[in-house]
Amino acid sequence: MSPPEARLWTALRRGGLDGLKFRRQHPFGRCLLDFYCAALRLAVEVDGAHHTLDGEVERDAARDRWLRIQGVRTLRLPAHEVMDSLDGALSAIRAFIAEGRRGPPPPPFGGPPPPRGGG
């Protein structure tokens, strides 16, 4: 794990975020999710600077679309924000969860897997 991922994991593990169980480095199809909460079908990705490079933004978007088709919502947190404010990152996760509970249900399962290398 990268330092920002390790920092976030210390807060998420053992139900540290409101009793929710997260797994780290969770395989899902061809994807490897940084953090995954099965109860909420929520992936949390900690994105370093390389995620802003040409091609990576499109690859991340395709991966997120595929996950959404599978019924998994994805929250992307910039790595520098996790390092600058862990409390802010946890608040962002809570807000994302709350918004999802008010929103429409996830779409049905199906669809082709995302391209390899999206991790």
Image (tube, rainbow, N blue to C red):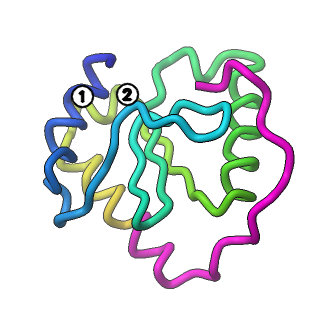
Q: Relative to 96, does residue 28 appear above or below in the rendering?
A: above
The magenta span reads 96-119
User: Which corner quadrant holds the C terminus?
Assistant: top right
Disc number at residue 106?
none
Q: Relative to 47, does residue 65 appear above or below in the rendering?
A: below
Residue where numbered disc 1 is placed: 83
**SS assignment at label 2:** helix
Residue 27 percent coordinates (x, y): 52, 35
Q: Is residue 115 magenta?
A: yes
Disc number at residue 79?
2
- Residue reaching furthest right? 112
Judge from the rendering whether residue 50 lies leftward or rightward of residue 113; answer left or right: left
* Disc 1 residue crowd, few under 14, some 14–19, many 20+, Cα 10 Å: some
Q: Relative to 19, does residue 117 appear above or below in the rendering?
A: above
Q: Do the residues labelled 1 and 2 touch (CB within 8 Å)?
A: yes
Q: Nearer the viewer, residue 117 or 86?
A: 117
